[in-house]
Image: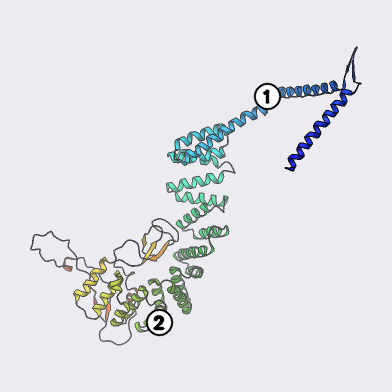
Amino acid sequence: MLWSLLKILIFVVIVAALAYGAGLLMESEEGIRIAFMNTEITVAPLQAVILGLVLMGLVWVLLKLAGLCVAVLKFIAGDETAVTRYFNRNRERRGFQALSEGMLALASGEGHLALAKAARAEKYLNKPELTNLLTAQAAEMTGDRKKALAVYKQLLGDDKTRFVGVRGLMKQKLEEGEHTTALKLAEKAFDLKPAHTETQDILLKLQAEHADWTGARKTLNAKLKHGSLPRNVHKRRDAVLALSEARGVLEDGKSIEAREAAIEANRLSPDLIPAAAMAARGYIEQGKKRYATRVLKKTWAVQPHPELAAAFAEIEPDETPKARIKRFEALTKQTPNDPETRMMLAELSIAAEDFEAARKALGDLAENDPSARALTLMAAIERGQGAEDSLVRGYLTRALTAPRGPQWVCDNCGTAHAVWASVCDNCSSFDTLSWKKPADTQIAGLSPSAMMPLLVDAPKVSEPAAETIEVVEPVVEETEEATEVEPVEDETPEEPEILEPPALHVVEK
């Protein structure tokens, strides 16, 4: 409000001053005399002021006309002028409009329209760093991979667009299944932009597929450094890579280096079951049984697993079955209600020929949570207690079609694996295998690695005994004598022939 009032006052003062000056000029009797050659002109003061203003206007017009003439001459000569800038602005406006329309067409899935708009934008803008990317993506959408490849190669020639070109070529090679070439391109892209999260993930996955564990650990450290990976996840995955590196070194015959790498992997992630088992065996080779026991106990408390039990049994390979049961209390007391603990304790009791204790340890697991291993253990218990063959065969028949129980299952695709691996065999996902029951029921295969691992390698008892019973792996005999099928007397449709379940062999010692 005050500022508006002040502006009005200033305007009034200026008008008053001009009016006062004009009045003084009009009252003045003297004028301006102009003499030129033989001509003399006398002008009044007010007229002189008006004449001066007119002359200034004429000079300004003449200067503008001279500038226009110079601009026309420069335009004809090809130099940049206001005229060329006007036309350039017009072309640039049309080019950016075509570029925006091409991007909208690309987002809408109209590949051919996007290609046309990209060509139009390139014609007006002449900026390949903007239009080539649109052209490449539109060419990929229309299936013209050859053109997309050529455009990505053009992007490699400019420092500003080199990363975009390498990334585009890398993705093309991945889609074509050329993972070796894609790995080299991913390494180049990582060198150009180490902080790019997508490039880090692709490079890490490809390095894991090619068993480049050392390079994968460097990439993982880069992810942690640039903040694209939480520290706890980095620690876990670094342990997985260290374990994979240990396995690779062990295959090369370098047992000492493999042992050290396994111990390092267990230190990074104590709950990693394969790392704990491998580290424990490394300690056993060094004679450090106490360290091996501590490692296995710590991991068993997190997740009981048959591989941990097998490694724990290797600590004292020559002990008697009863002594083994007592030593295994260090594990069984930590997770007494876990199914794996109950089945392991039943196996130990069967090895010690304490079938009543084995039945007590197994409990109702064969009925409430039946698996091939639990049913096979129940069959061994019934055979050990002298049950009828029909009852034993009944359990074994159920074991043939029962689920296998927990397995190494990929969290990404749900594929079950026989052994742990850092990379899923089906979807190539990294660090996605977990010990759990698969979503779909899988029929059990009676493999020694899945059932009674402690019985197969059970040591011989040094105590004198007249006769002992040893339960070994059931064997399916695919002979005609294994099954007797009675002839069908009625005319009902024939049922599929069912083989008699395998029997447990009794060996006298």
Residue 281 screen position, x and y as percent: 44, 73
* Residue 46 in view of the camera: yes
Residue at horizontal 56 percent and vertical 54 percent from the top: 195
**The one of 332 and 289 positioned closer to us in this rendering:** 332
Among the 4 quarters of the image, the one containing residue 5: top right
Q: Is residue 223 above or below residue 361?
A: above
Q: Please count the marks in the image.
A: 2
The answer for how far apart the CA atoms under marks 2 and 1 are is 99 Å
> Left or right: 94 with respect to 354?
right
Q: Amino acid at mark 2?
A: Arg
**The one of 250 and 388 positioned closer to us in this rendering:** 388
Residue at horizontal 22 percent and vertical 68 percent from the top: 477
Among the 4 quarters of the image, the one containing residue 456: bottom left
Front position among marks 2 and 1:
1
Badge 1 element = helix
Residue at horizontal 46 percent and vertical 79 percent from the top: 289
Give the quadrant of the C terminus.
bottom left
Q: Amino acid at mark 1?
A: Ala
Q: Residues within 10 Å of mark 1 (few under 14, many from 20)?
A: few
Badge 2 element = helix
Residue 68 screen position, x and y as percent: 71, 23
Give the quadrant of the N terminus.
top right
For marks 2 and 1, the one nearer the N-term is 1
Per the rendering, the mark at residue 77 is 1
Among the 4 quarters of the image, the one containing residue 39: top right
> Left or right: 174 with respect to 347?
right
Per the rendering, the mark at residue 327 is 2
Q: Is residue 108 above or below residue 506?
A: above
Residue at horizontal 19 percent and vertical 68 percent from the top: 500
Residue 267 screen position, x and y as percent: 51, 70
* Residue 507 in view of the camera: no
Residue 253 screen position, x and y as percent: 45, 66
